Image (cartoon, grey):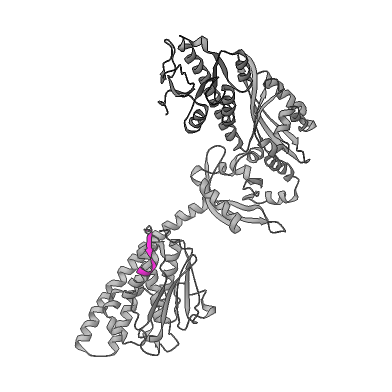
Amino acid sequence: MNGPADSIHVLQVDDAPVLDGTAEVPDGQESDPLTVTTTDRADSALERLEADAIDGIVTADDLPDRSGCAFVDAVRERDSDIPILLLTDSASVASDAVSNGATDVFRKDTYAGHSDLLVNRIRLLVEHYQSTQTAVRTRQQLTELAEQSDELLWVFSGDWSEIQFVNSAYETLYGRSAESLQANPAEFMTAIHPDDQDSVIQAMQRASAGESVDLEFRITRSDGEQRWMRAKAKPVVEDGTVTRIVGASRDITERKRRESRLDARRSDASASMADAIPDIFYVLDEDGDLARWNDAMPAVTGYTDTELASMALAELFVSSDRETVRERTEAAFETGEAYFKADLLTADGSTLPYEFTGGRIEAADGSTRGVAGIGRDISDRDGRQQALERQNERLEEFASVVSHDLRNPLDVARGQLELARAAHDSEHLDGVKRAHDRIGQLIEDLLTLARNGEEALDIEPVPLQTVVEQCWQTVETGDATLELQTSAVVRADPSRLRQLFENLIRNSVEHGCTSGRMESGDSVEHGSTPSSEKQENAGEQRAMPSLSHSQGGAADLTLTVGELDDGFYIADDGVGIPVDEREDVFEGGYSLASGPGFGLRIVDEIADTHGWSVAVTESDAGGARFEITGVAFDAA
């Protein structure tokens, strides 16, 4: 059986036991009590040793099934450290027992009437065993922790004559075995570069005198390779004497190489060309660290070349931009180019808005050697942006005034048209109404263009299928057919995205079958947004050749909406857009007919506001295909 968690569990092997089930500690001593499990046979005791957690063993020397010494041998085959106390009155047995593995021997006649002496002896043996085991486990844990470190960790005696601990990083950094160093601590000095040995010896002497040291020196590995090391050592002082010196060493070869490149770059002819650039020119090495720069870098940041050589790249930017810098730098290594804006943090603590571009540097074998790029001050650009915003405000004011001044006479004209229709039934009045509708749509498109981007985007997950189906219900599509080949969910402003699809759908429906048969008086705007008047009179407009696709084969028009790797597209099987005109379709005023052509300009503005790109090409069926890319998909 097992005793309480706070007791010492002792296995007693004796056919005449002297200890009770629980043996109390003598008065005046603070220790855990002994819980005693007793058996009279060695075989039974060995079974209990396998099954129970035993802290110590007390055994007689004359067991019924074997001798005490034989029992000790059997225990040691299973556990080499557990304390065993042998009870005997024979001097020869006592001598053999100790040599065969017994921890201690106690004379039987000694404990007669003094069992407290036996209890105390057992307690001391067990507590020593437990403290030793704890020390072993602690050392093992520390050793395991040290073995996980990339740094070389070591402990020397105070006079450097003995190596008390060294982790396996020694083998990685020095190319030599840790066992050889422990056997010959002087081996440490044989690896030091001859030119650096004096400075290392002086540092060792200072550490032995009680001073902490920090030193850089060169070593030569066993394979002949030369490396740079940095070692920090701290003395441990006990009773006024340095008993040992603990330290850590790490490889700084790459840093030294960067510093060497810094020294050499001034003599490089390319450096003078880079210095002629007014913007910051920089080169990152394969690890993403600064390797080269032009004179603009220290001039702008206020740091010296030496300071820049020892700084991490992130230290040159404000904390809020450092993650962006890291991500975009990694992107340059992966994709070959990068662009980002970030605030430089100068030596005096001030900040400067900068724009950075970068491109990957490749070796002849295709491997990546680093990234080179330019950093440009955009303080003036920010000022121009503010001026542009003020200009846009004036444009908005102008558009509002124009639209107001145009709407008033347009409303009067529409009212007069209704009176004329009531008095006269003339087909010429239909053309007047269509002209009124085009004027109204022109006003709406002008306001849309003027105000696009003014309001902040309300970005949220938007299912493409849902928004396209909604647009298909509101846009006059005649007999055209819709094919949805996407279930993607994109990050966008729902109302702006819907406006984009309405314009693209209308563009395909109204112009997919344009082939020169439209009459000039019946033309429509290229991809314009629907007006309320147009929807209210949809039945009337469907009878017009310019909008009806039930005539001339337009009923066969099919629109397809699908997804791309980084966006989506809308394509039709109509007549398409000529190659030499595709560059112009997003310019204001372009139209396949004679309308104002603001619809696709609005599409381009909405895409640009979202940070997307829009392009037109030919669909698989020979019609028009509009591709919107740079779109973020919703992860959910």
**Could you tell me if residue 211 is visible in this image?**
no
Q: Nearer the viewer, residue 495 or 196?
A: 196
Q: Residue furthest right?
A: 194
Residue at image x 74%, y 30%? Answer: 188
Task: Describe residue 510's horizontal placement relative to residue 621 as left or right.
Answer: left
Residue at horizontal 72%, vertical 45%?
Answer: 265
Considering depth in this image, is 577 or 278 the residue closer to the camera?
Answer: 577
Q: Which residues are magenta?
A: 458-466
Q: Is residue 358 left or right of residue 455?
A: right
Residue at x 50%, y 79% (from the top left corner)? 620
Judge whether 311 appears above or below 133 on screen. below
Q: Residue at x 61, y 23 (%)?
A: 101
Q: Residue furthest left?
A: 423
Rendered image quadrant of residue 301: top right
Q: Position of residue 98 (x, y in %)?
A: 61, 19
Quick one: quadrant of the N terminus?
top left
